[in-house]
Amino acid sequence: MRARILMLLLAVTFAAYAKTALLEHVGLQWRPTSDLKLGAMQMSQATVQFETFQDARDNKESIGENLEDDNKPRPVTTTDDVGAFVGKHVRELFDHSGIKTVDSNGDVTVKGEVKQFFVRETSTYKSEVAIHVSVVGRDGKPRWSGVATGDATRFGRSYKAENYYEVLSDGVVNAVSSMLESAEFQKALSGR
């Protein structure tokens, strides 16, 4: 009988802990559910070099919050380098689109600063991603500069890391889609 009561108390304690456990210092994971949109992209033959993106956000650990309980928002934080994470996956998306990326001596260099990388969870998960991107020619002259934005919304179970990963990844995919669909950005990538 005591063993049964002890097991019941442990189950209740575990359930209470699981409900209140915070998503703090989570490792970032790439989990896109959206497809890259290329529009009428003119494929550049120029090689594109990427510099490591910088995290220019004020609160570098904060990547989201659950606002379902009006009295006490629950944070989502990471100690990972958000700039490096976003830059790595932006480069992968460029490769996926057919643009040739290189580690050095590119015809153009893409530099980036992550300005926003955040999810607000209420009845849905809503991400907002903003990246200030610059394209610089081999001669060091700027060819294009602007902010690429992407957002995503999804439903999911409350306060789950997987949903945060998916909606943040989709925000990055959508920001890259907006870049690659821009005629001015395409022209800058061509090295002309």
Image (cartoon, rainbow, N blue to C red):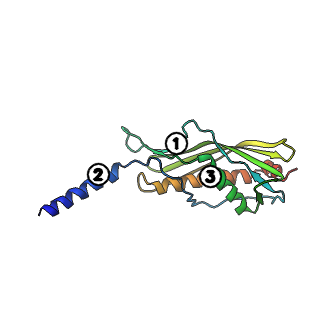
* Percent coordinates x, y for residue 101 in the rendering: 76, 58
- Callout 1 environment at 10 Å: few (<14), some (14 to 19), or many (20+)? some
Label disc, if present, on residue 16 of the rendered structure: 2
Check disc 3 and give the amino acid type.
Answer: Val
Q: Are marks 2 and 1 in contact (CB under 8 Å)?
A: no
Disc 2 residue type? Ala
Q: Look at mark 3 in the image and give the residue it sits on.
A: 172
Which residue occupies 40% across, 45% down? Answer: 68
- Please tell me how many numbered marks the rendered image carries: 3
Is tag 2's residue or tag 3's residue first in the polypeptide sequence?
2
Q: Quadrant of the N terminus?
A: bottom left
Direction from residue 77 to residue 150 in the image, left or right: right
Q: Tag 1, which secondary structure?
A: loop
Q: Are marks 2 and 3 in contact (CB under 8 Å)?
A: no
- Sequence-wise, the earlier of marks 2 and 1 is 2
- Front of the two marks 1 and 3: 1
| Image disc number at residue 61 | 1
- Observer-nearest residue: 173 or 103? 103
> On screen, 184 above or below 9?
above
Q: Residue furthest left?
A: 1
Q: Which residue sits at x=59%, y=55%? A: 170
Who is closer to the viewer here, 135 or 60? 60
Of tags 2 and 1, the one toward the viewer is 1
Lower sequence index among marks 1 and 3: 1
Q: Secondary structure at mark 2?
A: helix
Closer to the camera, 174 or 87? Answer: 87
In the displayed orientation, state which residue is furthest to the front: 104
Q: Residue at x 29, y 55 (%)?
A: 15
Q: Is residue 78 left or right of residue 104?
A: left
Q: Position of residue 118 (x, y in %)?
A: 54, 45
Rendering coords of residue 14 (x, y %): 29, 55
Q: SS of the residue at dot 3?
A: helix
